[in-house]
Image (tube, rainbow, N blue to C red):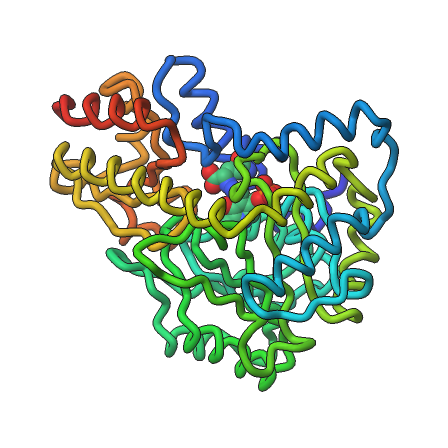
Amino acid sequence: MTDAPWRRAARGALLLDADGVARPTIFAEMSALAAATGALNLGQGFPDEDGPTELLETARDAIASGVNQYPPGLGMPVLREAIARHQQRFYDLEVDPDREVLVTAGATEALAATLLAFVEAGDEVVTLEPVYDSYAAVIALAGGRHVPVPLAAPDFRPDPEALRAAVTDRTRIILLNTPHNPTGAMLDAGLLDLAIELAHRHDALVVTDEVYEHLVFDGRVHVPAATRPGAHGRVITISSAGKTFSTTGWKIGWLTAAPTLRDAVLAVKQFLTYVNGAPFQPAVARGLDLPDAFFRDAAATLEGKRDLLSAGLRDAGFAVSRPSGSYFVIADAAPLGVHDAEEFCRRLPALAGVVGIPLTAFVHPDRRGPYRSLVRFAFCKRVEVLREAADRLAAIRV
Ligand code: PMP
Ligand code: GLN
């Protein structure tokens, strides 16, 4: 078989090993390690409890009442309308449910379809690194060039000058993520304004991944790029039900964008999955219409879990970041005498019965130096699991 360009690029992005065999994602690898060892899985970011009963009941009712065939290609009207109401209620954004919304198979498909729609071979995509693994993968599949802006510990905020330097006329997409996985950092309005200004200047698009939009702490307010001046026609906003409603296995995501942008993504999306998740779509619509108190409580509960795990990690001797949002906290194992978090994470199930993910998994091998001793732990787990994990970590002797 000839070596297709995407295979070469995918090897470069470490999706394939030297023999062209697909590597498991870091999340799959670490969840398998947790399952094999019986360790507490603070690796892959998924909750270990169900979300609101209203959603679960609506999905069950939908299956029982025959909502089991292909939904419309754009997504069911009931969900597109709920997405538009959600953008209005939380962000005062006017979104046309028929022309400006697309339902996707999770945020993952929204990201993939968007990158495949706009990135031509050789085009550059600017991201914030450490970076969510699917971004580098799909940039490679599209034949694009990945241009990362580094985020430095402990607060992981991008340097505006580094963003300015990264964006050029070769840039097609500035791909931002706020709140950010893996670091939990949030982007402020000034940085979003700069991204939009640069997108105008260089004829690029700003794509924002906002899957943790409701999971923010310490009274912080999530700012969608779409609310900023100059956003119209330049910004594509991506989100998902998975994190907000603890339904990561349902894979219902969406994007909102001006009609021409939405239609360009639809052209690709219809040949990726075509559609997905019919009975889950009315259920997520129900979720998006839940009262404000649900969203407030979800964030407050998760903030308590962040504090619980962070305190446990600190007591165990780690230096701990303070994430403003997301499911994740970054712990520096250097004070424990650990300088290779990859090796440490491989030993952690045996050492402590806990799984975490080395931050280097989110960084290209050429740039891993500053992140060597850092570990990402997920705190979207039951309180008793977090307590047990903290106790076990406190007992380790490296
Ligand atoms: N983007 C980020 C930043 C994520 O953390 C995740 C999943 N954890 C996704 C996208 C994918 O979302 P989904 O499961 O809806 O495809
Ligand atoms: N987004 C989840 C995480 O960051 C994992 C999703 C996946 O396994 N692809 O842990």
Q: Is 4 in front, or is 302? A: 302
Left or right for 248, reference 189: right
For the C terminus, which image quadrant? top left
Decide if residue 13 is in sight here. Answer: no
As drawn, 242 above or below 143: above
Q: Is residue 367 above or below residue 377?
A: below
Q: In which quadrant is the N terminus drawn?
A: top right
Q: Position of residue 18 (x, y in %)?
A: 55, 36
The quadrant where residue 327 appears: top left
Q: Nearer the viewer, residue 337 or 108?
A: 108
Residue appearing at x 14%, y 22% in the figure: 395
Task: Pinpoint residue 233: horizontal percent, then vertical percent.
Answer: 69, 76
**Residue at the spot x=60%, y=83% of the render?**
200
Total marks placed: 0
Across and down, in percent, residue 338 comes to: 18, 36
Quadrant in the picture for residue 308: top left
Which residue is pictured at 66% across the width and 28% down the height? 57
**Residue placed farthest to the bottom in the image?**
201
